[in-house]
Image (tube, grey):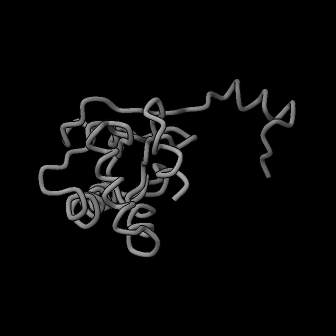
Amino acid sequence: DSVIGALEGHPERRFVWAEASFLETWLQRDASEAQRATLRSLVAQGRMEIVGGGYVMHDEAVTSKYAQVRQMQVGHEEVLRPFFGEGFRVKHGWQIDPFGQGTFSPTLMALAGYEAWVTNRVGEFVKDEMKRDQGFRVK
C-alpha cells in the first residue's frame, strides 16, 4: 500500500519490484480493486517496473538450473501474466545475491530475451573492510 501511495501524485518517483511472490501476496490479501488498477497504470507508465520476473530471486549458491528456470516460469505464468495480461514482458533481469552469481543466471536472462541484467557483488576487499570496521556483522 505504501509504495502505491508514495508513487501516486508524484510523477518524478519510480519503483522497482523484484519478486512476484510478494506481489502475489499483496494482490491476493490486501490490494483493493483501485490499487490494482493503479498498479497496472504505474507499470504501463514505466513508473513502476517489474524486474527479474521470477517467483523469487533465486539463491545462486544452493539451487539447480532446473529450479531457477521453474521459479522464473512460476513468476511469469502464475502471477505476472494473469495480472498484467498475456502481452506483459519483463525487460530487465535482476540478480543481486550478495555472494555473486553463477554462470547460469546471465544465460537464463539472455535466453528470456531481457534487454539488460542488473547484478550485485560485494567484493572481498569491501567485505574485509566492513568486518574490520564492524559495518557488516558476520557470525
**How far across and how far down the image is residue 41, in percent?**
29, 48
**In the foreground, 19 or 23:** 23
Q: Residue furthest top?
A: 125
Judged left or right of residue 134, residue 83 is left
Q: Residue furthest left?
A: 87
Q: Residue shown at 29%/56% (left/top)? A: 72
From the viewer's perspective, is residue 139 above or below residue 97?
below
Report the label total.
0
Judged left or right of residue 81, residue 19 is right
**How far across and how far down the image is residue 58, in percent?**
43, 54
Q: Residue furthest right?
A: 133
Judged left or right of residue 111, residue 8 is right
Q: Residue shown at 37%/37% (left/top)? A: 47
From the viewer's perspective, is residue 84 above or below residue 113?
below
**How far across and how far down the image is residue 74, in percent?**
27, 64
Q: Residue furthest bottom?
A: 29
Judged left or right of residue 85, residue 39 is right
Q: Residue shown at 12%/50% (left/top)? A: 87
Q: Residue shown at 46%/29% (left/top)? A: 12
**How far across and how far down the image is residue 137, in percent?**
80, 45
Q: Quadrant of residue 42?
A: top left
From the viewer's perspective, is residue 24 above or below residue 134?
below
**In the foreground, 125 or 78:** 78
From the viewer's perspective, is residue 63 above or below residue 95?
below
